[in-house]
Amino acid sequence: MDLRLQGLTALVTGSHRGTGMIIANHLAREGARVLVHGLQPGQAEDAVKTLGCGFPVTGDITTDVGAEDLFSACAGESLDILINNYGTADAGTWETSDSDDWITAYQKNVLSAQRLIRHFLPAMRVKNWGRIINLGTVGSSRPNARMPQYYAAKGALATMTISLAKETARSGIRVNLVSPGLILTPEVEAAWLARGRKAGWGDTWEDIEPKVAEDIPIGRIVRREEVAYLVAFLVSPLADALHGQNIRIDGGATDMLT
Protein backbone atom coordinates (compact mmCIF):
# COMPACT_ATOMS: atom_id res chain seq x y z
CA MET A 1 0.00 0.00 0.00
CA ASP A 2 1.30 3.44 -0.95
CA LEU A 3 0.80 5.68 2.10
CA ARG A 4 1.45 8.81 -0.01
CA LEU A 5 4.09 10.23 2.33
CA GLN A 6 6.44 11.32 -0.45
CA GLY A 7 7.25 15.00 -0.17
CA LEU A 8 6.08 15.28 3.44
CA THR A 9 8.38 16.26 6.31
CA ALA A 10 8.10 14.57 9.70
CA LEU A 11 9.71 15.18 13.08
CA VAL A 12 9.82 12.17 15.42
CA THR A 13 10.88 13.16 18.92
CA GLY A 14 13.18 10.81 20.78
CA SER A 15 13.93 8.98 17.55
CA HIS A 16 17.62 8.52 18.32
CA ARG A 17 16.73 5.16 19.92
CA GLY A 18 14.03 2.60 20.62
CA THR A 19 10.55 2.71 19.16
CA GLY A 20 11.08 6.26 17.92
CA MET A 21 13.99 5.15 15.75
CA ILE A 22 11.87 2.40 14.23
CA ILE A 23 9.05 4.86 13.53
CA ALA A 24 11.52 7.24 11.87
CA ASN A 25 12.95 4.46 9.74
CA HIS A 26 9.53 3.30 8.59
CA LEU A 27 8.44 6.82 7.63
CA ALA A 28 11.67 7.32 5.68
CA ARG A 29 11.12 4.04 3.83
CA GLU A 30 7.66 5.32 2.90
CA GLY A 31 9.25 8.37 1.28
CA ALA A 32 8.96 11.03 3.99
CA ARG A 33 11.74 13.46 4.84
CA VAL A 34 12.37 12.54 8.48
CA LEU A 35 13.98 14.72 11.14
CA VAL A 36 15.65 12.34 13.60
CA HIS A 37 15.71 13.87 17.06
CA GLY A 38 18.09 13.49 19.96
CA LEU A 39 18.05 15.28 23.29
CA GLN A 40 21.83 15.54 23.60
CA PRO A 41 24.51 16.38 21.00
CA GLY A 42 25.63 13.38 18.99
CA GLN A 43 22.57 11.20 19.64
CA ALA A 44 20.70 12.11 16.46
CA GLU A 45 23.84 12.01 14.34
CA ASP A 46 24.65 8.49 15.55
CA ALA A 47 21.06 7.39 14.85
CA VAL A 48 21.15 8.75 11.31
CA LYS A 49 24.36 6.80 10.69
CA THR A 50 22.71 3.65 12.03
CA LEU A 51 19.56 4.15 9.97
CA GLY A 52 21.26 5.28 6.81
CA CYS A 53 18.60 7.92 6.37
CA GLY A 54 17.12 11.00 8.02
CA PHE A 55 18.35 14.40 9.11
CA PRO A 56 19.64 14.97 12.66
CA VAL A 57 18.20 17.64 14.96
CA THR A 58 18.93 18.19 18.64
CA GLY A 59 17.25 19.79 21.66
CA ASP A 60 16.31 18.80 25.20
CA ILE A 61 12.56 19.21 24.88
CA THR A 62 12.02 18.67 28.61
CA THR A 63 13.00 22.34 29.06
CA ASP A 64 11.98 25.58 27.37
CA VAL A 65 15.61 26.40 26.52
CA GLY A 66 16.23 22.98 25.00
CA ALA A 67 13.02 23.18 22.99
CA GLU A 68 14.21 26.50 21.55
CA ASP A 69 17.41 24.74 20.48
CA LEU A 70 15.31 22.20 18.58
CA PHE A 71 13.21 24.90 16.96
CA SER A 72 16.40 26.58 15.77
CA ALA A 73 17.63 23.26 14.37
CA CYS A 74 14.34 22.88 12.48
CA ALA A 75 14.39 26.42 11.08
CA GLY A 76 13.61 26.37 7.40
CA GLU A 77 11.76 23.05 7.62
CA SER A 78 8.11 23.03 6.59
CA LEU A 79 6.81 20.44 9.01
CA ASP A 80 3.80 18.36 7.94
CA ILE A 81 3.95 15.62 10.58
CA LEU A 82 4.76 15.88 14.28
CA ILE A 83 5.12 12.64 16.23
CA ASN A 84 5.54 13.23 19.94
CA ASN A 85 7.17 9.89 20.67
CA TYR A 86 9.50 10.99 23.45
CA GLY A 87 8.56 10.10 27.04
CA THR A 88 9.96 8.09 29.90
CA ALA A 89 8.61 5.98 32.73
CA ASP A 90 10.77 6.65 35.77
CA ALA A 91 10.49 4.35 38.77
CA GLY A 92 8.53 5.52 41.78
CA THR A 93 5.78 4.83 44.29
CA TRP A 94 3.21 6.87 46.20
CA GLU A 95 5.54 6.86 49.19
CA THR A 96 8.86 7.55 47.45
CA SER A 97 7.97 9.93 44.60
CA ASP A 98 8.14 13.54 45.77
CA SER A 99 6.86 16.70 44.10
CA ASP A 100 9.99 17.03 41.96
CA ASP A 101 9.45 13.51 40.61
CA TRP A 102 5.89 14.39 39.60
CA ILE A 103 6.98 17.64 37.97
CA THR A 104 9.75 15.80 36.09
CA ALA A 105 7.24 13.25 34.79
CA TYR A 106 5.03 16.08 33.56
CA GLN A 107 7.97 17.82 31.86
CA LYS A 108 9.01 14.63 30.07
CA ASN A 109 5.61 13.25 29.08
CA VAL A 110 3.35 16.28 28.67
CA LEU A 111 5.17 19.60 28.29
CA SER A 112 7.73 18.06 25.93
CA ALA A 113 4.83 17.52 23.50
CA GLN A 114 3.00 20.76 24.34
CA ARG A 115 6.06 22.88 23.54
CA LEU A 116 6.36 21.39 20.06
CA ILE A 117 2.66 21.53 19.30
CA ARG A 118 2.53 25.21 20.26
CA HIS A 119 5.47 25.96 17.99
CA PHE A 120 4.54 23.95 14.90
CA LEU A 121 0.75 24.23 14.93
CA PRO A 122 0.50 27.76 13.46
CA ALA A 123 2.29 26.76 10.25
CA MET A 124 0.06 23.71 9.91
CA ARG A 125 -2.95 26.02 10.20
CA VAL A 126 -1.61 28.17 7.36
CA LYS A 127 -1.25 25.08 5.14
CA ASN A 128 -4.57 23.71 6.43
CA TRP A 129 -2.94 20.29 6.61
CA GLY A 130 -0.96 18.43 9.23
CA ARG A 131 -0.71 15.33 11.34
CA ILE A 132 0.04 15.25 15.08
CA ILE A 133 0.46 11.92 16.85
CA ASN A 134 1.07 11.66 20.58
CA LEU A 135 2.47 8.40 21.94
CA GLY A 136 0.70 7.41 25.14
CA THR A 137 0.07 4.16 26.96
CA VAL A 138 -2.86 1.92 27.75
CA GLY A 139 -2.01 2.80 31.34
CA SER A 140 -3.64 6.20 30.91
CA SER A 141 -6.94 4.29 30.96
CA ARG A 142 -5.89 1.55 33.38
CA PRO A 143 -3.02 2.88 35.52
CA ASN A 144 -1.02 0.74 37.90
CA ALA A 145 -0.30 1.51 41.55
CA ARG A 146 3.42 1.82 40.81
CA MET A 147 4.89 4.84 38.97
CA PRO A 148 1.87 7.02 39.77
CA GLN A 149 3.60 10.15 38.49
CA TYR A 150 4.14 8.55 35.08
CA TYR A 151 0.56 7.34 34.65
CA ALA A 152 -0.82 10.67 35.81
CA ALA A 153 1.33 12.45 33.23
CA LYS A 154 0.27 10.10 30.44
CA GLY A 155 -3.34 10.65 31.47
CA ALA A 156 -2.78 14.37 31.04
CA LEU A 157 -1.27 13.72 27.59
CA ALA A 158 -4.44 11.83 26.62
CA THR A 159 -6.77 14.64 27.66
CA MET A 160 -4.47 17.18 25.99
CA THR A 161 -4.76 15.21 22.75
CA ILE A 162 -8.55 15.39 22.78
CA SER A 163 -8.46 19.10 23.59
CA LEU A 164 -6.13 19.68 20.62
CA ALA A 165 -8.37 17.61 18.35
CA LYS A 166 -11.27 19.90 19.25
CA GLU A 167 -9.09 22.96 18.69
CA THR A 168 -8.22 21.77 15.17
CA ALA A 169 -11.74 20.69 14.24
CA ARG A 170 -12.88 21.58 10.72
CA SER A 171 -9.33 21.98 9.53
CA GLY A 172 -7.02 19.72 7.56
CA ILE A 173 -5.08 18.88 10.71
CA ARG A 174 -5.61 15.45 12.24
CA VAL A 175 -4.68 14.67 15.84
CA ASN A 176 -4.62 11.22 17.44
CA LEU A 177 -3.19 9.33 20.40
CA VAL A 178 -1.48 5.95 19.96
CA SER A 179 -1.45 3.95 23.21
CA PRO A 180 0.73 0.83 23.22
CA GLY A 181 0.60 -1.84 25.87
CA LEU A 182 3.62 -3.98 26.64
CA ILE A 183 6.08 -3.70 23.73
CA LEU A 184 8.89 -6.13 22.98
CA THR A 185 12.04 -4.09 23.47
CA PRO A 186 15.53 -5.46 24.21
CA GLU A 187 15.09 -4.30 27.81
CA VAL A 188 11.71 -6.01 28.19
CA GLU A 189 13.01 -9.21 26.63
CA ALA A 190 16.09 -9.30 28.86
CA ALA A 191 14.07 -8.66 32.02
CA TRP A 192 11.50 -11.35 31.27
CA LEU A 193 14.15 -13.85 30.18
CA ALA A 194 15.85 -13.48 33.54
CA ARG A 195 12.55 -13.75 35.38
CA GLY A 196 11.33 -16.66 33.26
CA ARG A 197 14.49 -18.69 33.66
CA LYS A 198 14.34 -18.19 37.41
CA ALA A 199 10.71 -19.35 37.42
CA GLY A 200 11.53 -22.42 35.32
CA TRP A 201 9.55 -21.35 32.25
CA GLY A 202 12.38 -22.20 29.86
CA ASP A 203 15.60 -20.82 28.50
CA THR A 204 14.61 -19.04 25.28
CA TRP A 205 12.25 -16.20 24.43
CA GLU A 206 10.13 -18.66 22.45
CA ASP A 207 9.66 -20.66 25.66
CA ILE A 208 9.01 -17.69 27.90
CA GLU A 209 6.88 -15.33 25.79
CA PRO A 210 3.67 -17.44 26.05
CA LYS A 211 3.91 -17.16 29.84
CA VAL A 212 4.48 -13.42 29.66
CA ALA A 213 1.53 -13.03 27.29
CA GLU A 214 -0.96 -15.22 29.17
CA ASP A 215 -3.37 -12.29 29.50
CA ILE A 216 -2.86 -11.02 25.93
CA PRO A 217 -5.47 -12.47 23.52
CA ILE A 218 -3.10 -12.63 20.55
CA GLY A 219 -0.72 -14.73 22.65
CA ARG A 220 2.36 -12.55 22.26
CA ILE A 221 3.74 -9.10 22.97
CA VAL A 222 3.32 -6.30 20.43
CA ARG A 223 6.41 -5.60 18.33
CA ARG A 224 7.81 -2.09 17.93
CA GLU A 225 7.51 -2.42 14.16
CA GLU A 226 3.76 -2.86 14.56
CA VAL A 227 3.54 0.43 16.43
CA ALA A 228 5.51 2.06 13.61
CA TYR A 229 3.15 0.64 10.97
CA LEU A 230 0.16 2.06 12.84
CA VAL A 231 1.74 5.48 13.24
CA ALA A 232 2.72 5.59 9.55
CA PHE A 233 -0.86 4.89 8.51
CA LEU A 234 -2.30 7.49 10.88
CA VAL A 235 -0.08 10.26 9.51
CA SER A 236 -0.91 9.40 5.91
CA PRO A 237 -3.59 11.08 3.80
CA LEU A 238 -5.37 7.70 3.80
CA ALA A 239 -6.28 8.15 7.49
CA ASP A 240 -8.10 11.46 7.01
CA ALA A 241 -11.25 10.21 8.79
CA LEU A 242 -9.37 9.38 12.00
CA HIS A 243 -9.31 12.32 14.39
CA GLY A 244 -9.36 12.68 18.16
CA GLN A 245 -8.98 8.96 18.72
CA ASN A 246 -7.13 6.97 21.38
CA ILE A 247 -5.98 3.94 19.44
CA ARG A 248 -4.72 1.14 21.66
CA ILE A 249 -2.22 -1.36 20.30
CA ASP A 250 -1.87 -4.01 22.98
CA GLY A 251 -2.90 -7.32 21.41
CA GLY A 252 -6.40 -6.98 22.86
CA ALA A 253 -5.25 -6.93 26.48
CA THR A 254 -7.32 -3.86 27.41
CA ASP A 255 -10.83 -5.27 27.68
CA MET A 256 -12.85 -2.09 27.53
CA LEU A 257 -15.17 -0.65 24.91
CA THR A 258 -14.08 3.00 24.97
Image: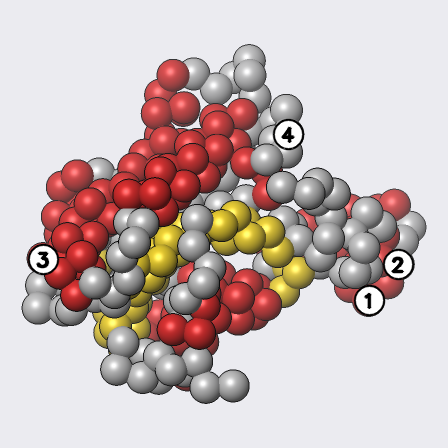
Is 199 situated left or right of 129 in this image? right
Residue 23 visible in this rendered orientation of the protein: no
Q: Amino acid at mark 4?
A: Asn
Dot 2 and dot 4 residues touching (CB under 8 Å): no
Q: Residue 206's mark? A: 1
Q: CA distance from mark 3 to mark 1?
A: 46 Å
Q: Earlier in the sequence, mark 3 or mark 1?
A: 3
Residue tagged by mark 2? 202
Instruction: Looking at this view, name the residue that lies furthest to the front.
Output: 170
Task: State the residue at coordinates (89%, 53%).
Answer: 201
Q: Amino acid at mark 2?
A: Gly
Disc 4 is placed on an element classified as loop
Disc 2 is placed on an element classified as loop
Task: State the residue at coordinates (62%, 56%).
Answer: 249
Q: CA distance from mark 2 to mark 4?
A: 28 Å
Disc 3 is placed on an element classified as helix
Q: Position of residue 107 (x, y in %)?
A: 32, 34
Q: Given this view, does label 2 or label 4 mark the residue nearer the observer? A: 4
Q: Given this view, does label 1 or label 4 mark the residue nearer the observer? A: 4
Q: Is residue 43 above or below residue 121?
A: below
Q: Residue 144's mark? A: 4
Q: Position of residue 119 (x, y in %)?
A: 16, 49
Dot 4 and dot 3 residues touching (CB under 8 Å): no
